[in-house]
Amino acid sequence: QEQLVESGGGSVQAGGSLTLSCAASGYRGHAMAWFRQAPGKSLEGVALTDADGNSRYAASVKGRFTIYKENAENTLYLAMNNLKPEDTAMYYCAAEGRSLSATMTFQGFDFGYWGQGIQVTVSS
């Protein structure tokens, strides 16, 4: 059964770091991404890595966040540095493709497979 399971969230002070993990079952060869949704705001794309390992970032996180995938483990990571209070959100791992779930388009890719989400809270 294909699934995406996030871990590594938590609370941190501004300027701190966290690394999120997403253990994937299946989805090899798919583009993978991280999205986030802050309270009262819409879901937004944060970073993606395509099947060739190329990465793209939202302007708000570029230079602070790094997305990478360990193919042997089939695990996606998001290393977050210099965190700001505005990074506080529920973070979701996503895989490219269309499913019965909601599909979000980010940087030209459609993501329709989702993890359950994990909370990141950054205090000032």
Image (cartoon, rainbow, N blue to C red):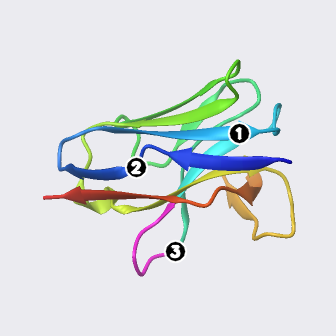
Q: Name the secondary structure under disc 1.
A: strand
Disc 3 residue type? Ser
Q: Identify which amino acid the numbered label 1 is placed on.
A: Ala
> Marks 2 and 1, how far apart in space?
17 Å
Assign the magenta stretch its main secondary structure: loop
Q: Residue at x 55, y 68 (%)?
A: 43
Give the alpha-carbon distance from disc 1 to disc 3, as whole Å.
Answer: 25 Å
Q: Disc 2 on helix, strand or loop?
A: loop
At x 39%, y 76%, the residue is: 39
Magenta range is: 36-41
* Label whose residue precedes the other's in the sequence (3 or 2): 2
Q: Quadrant of the C terminus?
A: bottom left
In this view of the protein, can residue 107 be seen by the observer?
A: no
Please tell me whether residue 81 is drawn above or below residue 53 in the rendered image: below
In the picture, the disc for residue 24 is 1
Label 2 crowd bin: few (<14), some (14–19), many (20+), radius 10 Å:
some
